[in-house]
Amino acid sequence: MQVIRFEVLNIGASARLAERLAGRWSVELDTERGDAIVVLVELGSTAEDLGLLLREVESWVEDESLVAIRCVVDGRAYVVSAGEAVWPEVGEGQDARDRRRHARLLEALDVVERLEGSDVLGVERLREELGFALRLIDQSS
């Protein structure tokens, strides 16, 4: 059994990656690092499974406008990159950024709710992290 690690800095994006991969692979979310959510993916037994997984993650990186994420295969770190960054509008205020961040976290909470009852491990802990992030944004408003 080979497990591939993907390090995702955005909590909502990690939920969406887990949802995207869970249909084909065993997925676990690890929130213990603090600086990133680790999405662990167990490869299947076919030789081409790693290639399929990396192409799927590359497509997801582009869809999320993340540009790149770190991946660990066989103890070696790699970067999966695709697409271009989407930058905030010049002059965008903190209130607008907070509203957008809040909306993305609520969207991620919807993803987590869809994942509950699935085979993805670590969903409950991710729900707690999302709740904490939402409370922080609400307190700063």
Image: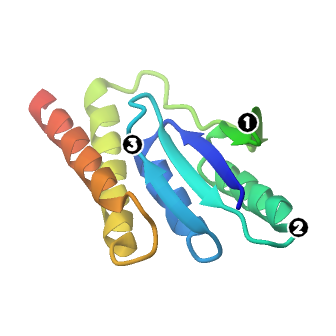
Task: Tell me if mark 2 has few (under 14), some (14-19) or many (20+) residues whose alpha carbon lies within 10 angstroms of its own.
Answer: few
Instruction: State the CA–CA distance, disc 2 to disc 3.
Output: 29 Å
Image marks 3 and 1: residues in contact by CB distance under 8 Å: no
Percent across and percent down for residue 130 are 28, 48
Identified by mark 2, the residue type is Glu
Point out which mark residue 48 bears: 2
Mark 1 or 2, nearer chain start: 2
Residue found at the far right of this picture: 47
Point out which mark residue 75 bears: 1
Q: Quadrant of residue 55?
A: bottom right
Residue found at the far left of this picture: 139
The residue located at (35%, 64%) in the rendering is 112
Identified by mark 3, the residue type is Thr
The residue located at (49%, 30%) in the rendering is 89
| In the depicted structure, whether residue 16 falls above or below residue 128 | below
- Quadrant where the N terminus lies? bottom right
Point out which mark residue 31 bears: 3
